[in-house]
């Protein structure tokens, strides 16, 4: 009964608390309404202020961006203030709820402390019972341990016996693998019942081991054979590697030779093609140059138009960029304000989260206490049923004490709550009166604002009409501008495409000009080389001409000298002494014959050249046809499927091998040709040297004969004359003879002829005549 009374008192206290909380929530709601009315009135006042400022600005017609932004910021600030006031109200409500929950928790704490004391007493009684039970269980475990110890001793004795048997079995199973084939057959012939354990195990081991041993022996033999084969293969591979390295070295050498010869061939082909390319492509290059000049003029015109368009676009872009910078600055200011407000919001949120966390912690503690109370209550009920008879008197005494204490506490709490309710009612009445006054003020301001709103609405409609008309005009202008912009964009794209094409063409022409410059430089170098060669040839020809002119002058002088002499024999001697009758190409007839011969030779060469050119063109046409056929054939071959494709690839590999072999053959043939030419040159040089030696010997004999002839002339005439002759002939190509004669002082005049140059290697006819005369004179004297 006492418990029921305490429960009823708790429930009544809880109901009172709930009533207090409902009254508080009602007061809070009224307070919130008053605050919202204040906020609404403040917002209406601010909006009225804004509307009045707008009307003034429209009257002045000087609205700036800065003022609009300032007004927007003021409006945002007011909104933030409203939100802050709402948050403050929410926080106040949460504080009130928190205080009510704290009171409830304090009451629960008192209840739990009382229950704790009761449970401690119960625990002490239970501990005594458990100690007695523990002593009984210890005695039981001691008896069970004694039984287990005896059982363990018996098992250890049995284990020793089994270990001895196992040792005997191990000794019997040693050397099981030493069973021969004869023993195996003997044991196999016996019955399985007569066999011992060791013999039975030996038979089983033999049957399992024998086939494996046979396999091992066969595998070892195979391994030896394979190792031998591997050694042989390694030797063969080493031999083949050496051969491959030798072939690679030979191939590298041949490739180097091929590269050298290909470079020489390219040089020769470029030298051959340079002459024809300039003649054939001169008109084409001129026409291309004219076409390029025209294109350049057109591109310059289009470029000027594009520059003008670009300037206008850049100006527009600069204006847009300025506007963008202004908007960015305003955006940065707004961001700063927003960040400041966000920081304040975050601080408030942090505080809210802390309060919520505390609330959650307290609610968790409350739940834990409730659970503990329920558990303890259940235990209490279970223990009460068991030990009801023993603790009834003690519990009654304690319950009487608790009733007295609780009644005193409840009286005190009721007095406190009444005082608190009276205070709150007073506050609420005052707040209600204030709210009514604010409401009246708000109604009055609302009427004023409504009148202002009507005026502003009429003005707004007028402005909207003007703005709509202005907007339609601006949209038309924007559509026109967009059309112009699209047209300009199209022109710009076209010009960009034209520019790209012009750049590509310019690059092509630049590459062509580079090629032409290279050809020009090569031609210049070749022309310079030709000029140098021609100058050298001219010098040689000039030297030869000077020699021929000197020779003709000397001949003229000798002929004039012989003509002046009256005695024919003396004249002939003078002529013979100066080399009259020498085979010298000094006549015009001889020159004409040579020029005619050369002209015929030139005509023959030109005909051969034209025929060769025609053949070249035919071969080129054939080559083009064959190339087309080859490309078609290769395309067909590439399109072929698997079996044919394999055959084609094998044929191609053989063709490449054949080509390499043919190239090597051609290189070897060229080398053989070079060696043959070198051999022929050596043979020619040897023959020339032998001929030069013979000529030198012949010249010595001629000199001896001439000396004898001069001595004979001296003796026959008896005149004092000194004849000196010097011959300078190297390898029989050039020889000069100079003679000086001194006549008597009584003579009228002395002619000194110039030296003569002999061009032939064979002795002249006058020399032969003189030699025969000397021989006949000797024979007569003899």
Image (cartoon, rainbow, N blue to C red):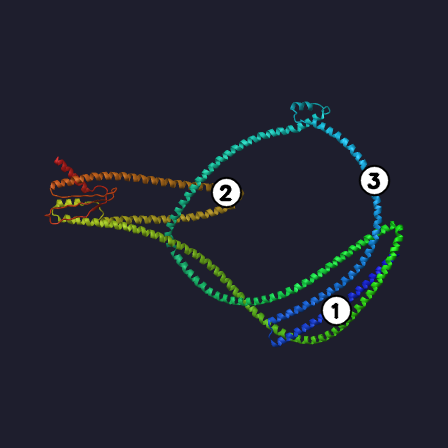
**Which residue does the numbered mark 2 point to in the structure image?**
649
Mark 1, secondary structure of its residue: helix
The residue carrying pointer 1 sits among few (fewer than 14), some (14 to 19) or many (20 or more) residues within 10 Å by Cα, namely few
Circle nearer the N terminus (1, 2) = 1
Quarter of the view holding residue 149: top right
Question: Nearest the camera: 271 or 311?
Answer: 311
Which of the two marks, 3 or 1, is nearer to us in this view?
A: 3
Q: CA distance from mark 1 to mark 2?
A: 97 Å
Q: CA distance from mark 3 to mark 1?
A: 78 Å
Q: Which is nearer the eye, 200 or 685? A: 200
User: Is 67 positioned to the left or the right of 384 in the image?
Assistant: left
Q: Nearer the viewer, residue 494 or 57?
A: 57
Question: Residue 648 location in percent, x, y?
Answer: 50, 42
Snapshot quadrant of residue 283: bottom left
Name which residue lies at 82% across and 57% down: 111
Label 2 to label 3, Cα distance in Å?
98 Å
Q: Residue at x 39, y 55 (%)?
A: 517
Q: Earlier in the sequence, mark 3 or mark 1?
A: 1
Looking at the image, is mark 2 or mark 3 nearer the viewer? 3
Q: Which residue is mark 1?
A: 33
Q: Which residue position is annotated with label 3?
A: 140
Q: Residue 41: horizontal and vertical position, in percent?
A: 71, 72
Image mark count: 3
Q: Is residue 461 visible?
A: no
Q: Which secondary structure lies at badge 3? A: helix
Q: Residue at x 53, y 42 (%)?
A: 643
Q: Nearer the viewer, residue 763 or 79?
A: 79
- Could you tell me which secondary element the residue under label 2 belongs to? helix
- Dot 3 alpha-carbon crowd within 10 angstroms: few under 14, some 14 to 19, many 20 or more: few
């Amino acid at each position: 009964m006492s418990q029921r009374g305490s429960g009823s008192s708790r429930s009544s206290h809880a109901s009172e608390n709930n009533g207090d909380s409902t009254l508080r929530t009602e007061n809070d709601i009224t307070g919130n309404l008053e605050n919202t009315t204040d906020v609404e009135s403040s917002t209406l006042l601010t909006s009225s202020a804004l509307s009045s400022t707008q009307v003034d600005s429209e009257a002045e017609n000087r609205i700036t961006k800065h003022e609009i932004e300032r007004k927007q910021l003021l409006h945002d600030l007011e909104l933030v203030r409203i939100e802050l006031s709402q948050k403050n109200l929410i926080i106040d409500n949460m504080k009130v709820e928190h205080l009510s929950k704290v009171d409830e928790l304090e009451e629960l704490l008192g209840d739990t402390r009382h229950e704790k004391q009761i449970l401690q007493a119960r625990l002490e009684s239970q501990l005594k019972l458990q100690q007695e039970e523990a002593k009984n269980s210890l005695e039981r475990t001691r008896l069970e341990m004694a039984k287990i110890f005896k059982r363990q001793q018996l098992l250890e004795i049995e284990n020793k016996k089994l270990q001895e048997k196992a040792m005997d079995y191990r000794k019997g199973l040693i050397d099981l693998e030493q069973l021969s084939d004869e023993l195996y057959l003997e044991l196999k012939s016996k019955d399985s019942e007569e066999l011992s354990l060791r013999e039975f195990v030996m038979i089983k081991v033999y049957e399992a081991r024998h086939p494996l041993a046979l396999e091992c022996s066969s595998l070892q033999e195979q391994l030896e054979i394979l190792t031998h084969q591997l050694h042989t293969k390694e030797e063969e591979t080493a031999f083949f590697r050496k051969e491959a390295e030798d072939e690679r070295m030979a191939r590298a050498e041949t490739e180097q030779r091929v590269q050298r010869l290909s470079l020489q061939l390219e040089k020769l082909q470029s030298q051959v093609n340079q002459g024809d390319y300039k003649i054939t492509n001169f008109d084409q290059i001129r026409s291309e140059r004219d076409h390029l000049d025209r294109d350049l003029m057109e591109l310059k015109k289009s470029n000027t138009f594009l520059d003008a368009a670009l300037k206008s676009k850049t100006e527009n872009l600069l204006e847009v960029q300025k506007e963008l910078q202004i908007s960015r600055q305003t955006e940065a200011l707004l961001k700063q304000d927003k960040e400041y407000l966000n920081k304040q919001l975050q601080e408030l949120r942090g505080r809210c989260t802390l309060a919520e966390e505390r609330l959650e912690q307290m609610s968790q503690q409350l739940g834990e206490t409730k659970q503990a109370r329920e558990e303890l209550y259940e235990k209490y009920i279970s223990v009460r049923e068991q030990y009801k008879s023993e603790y009834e008197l003690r519990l009654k005494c304690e319950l009487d004490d608790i009733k007295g204490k609780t009644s005193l506490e409840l009286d005190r709490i009721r007095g406190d709550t009444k005082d608190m309710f009276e205070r709150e009612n007073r506050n609420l009445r005052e707040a209600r009166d204030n709210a009514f006054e604010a409401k009246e003020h708000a109604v009055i301001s609302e009427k004023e604002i409504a009148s202002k709103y009507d005026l502003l609405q009429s003005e707004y409609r007028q402005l909207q009409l003007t703005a709509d008309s202005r907007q339609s005009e601006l949209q038309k202008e924007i559509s026109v501008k967009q059309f112009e912009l699209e047209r300009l964009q199209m022109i710009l794209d076209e010009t960009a495409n034209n520019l790209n094409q012009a750049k590509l063409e310019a690059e092509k022409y630049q590459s062509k000009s580079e090629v032409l410059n290279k050809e020009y430089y090569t031609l210049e170098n070749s022309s310079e080389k030709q000029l140098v060669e021609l100058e050298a040839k001219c010098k040689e020809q000039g030297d030869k001409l000077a020699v021929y002119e000197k020779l003709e002058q000397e001949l003229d002088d000798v002929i004039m000298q012989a003509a002046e002499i009256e005695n024919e024999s003396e004249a002939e001697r003078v002529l013979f002494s100066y080399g009259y009758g020498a085979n010298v190409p000094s006549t015009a007839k001889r020159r004409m014959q040579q020029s005619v011969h050369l002209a015929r030779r030139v005509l023959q060469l030109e005909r051969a050249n034209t025929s060769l050119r025609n053949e070249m063109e035919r071969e080129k046409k054939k080559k083009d046809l064959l190339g087309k056929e080859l490309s078609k054939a290769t395309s067909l071959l590439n399109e072929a499927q698997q079996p044919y494709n394999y055959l084609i690839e094998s044929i191609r590999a053989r063709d490449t091998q054949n080509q390499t072999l043919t190239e090597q053959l051609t290189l070897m043939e060229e080398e053989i040709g070079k060696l043959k030419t070198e051999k022929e040159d050596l043979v020619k040089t040897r023959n020339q040297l032998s001929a030069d030696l013979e000529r030198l010997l012949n010249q010595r004999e001629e000199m001896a004969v001439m000396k004898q002839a001069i001595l004979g002339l001296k003796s026959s005439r008896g005149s004092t004359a000194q004849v000196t002759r010097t011959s300078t002939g190297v390898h029989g190509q050039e020889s000069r003879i100079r003679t000086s004669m001194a006549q008597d002082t009584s003579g009228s005049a002395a002619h000194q002829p110039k030296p003569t140059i002999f061009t032939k290697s064979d002795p002249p006819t006058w020399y032969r005549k003189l030699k025969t005369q000397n021989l006949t004179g000797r024979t007569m004297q003899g």
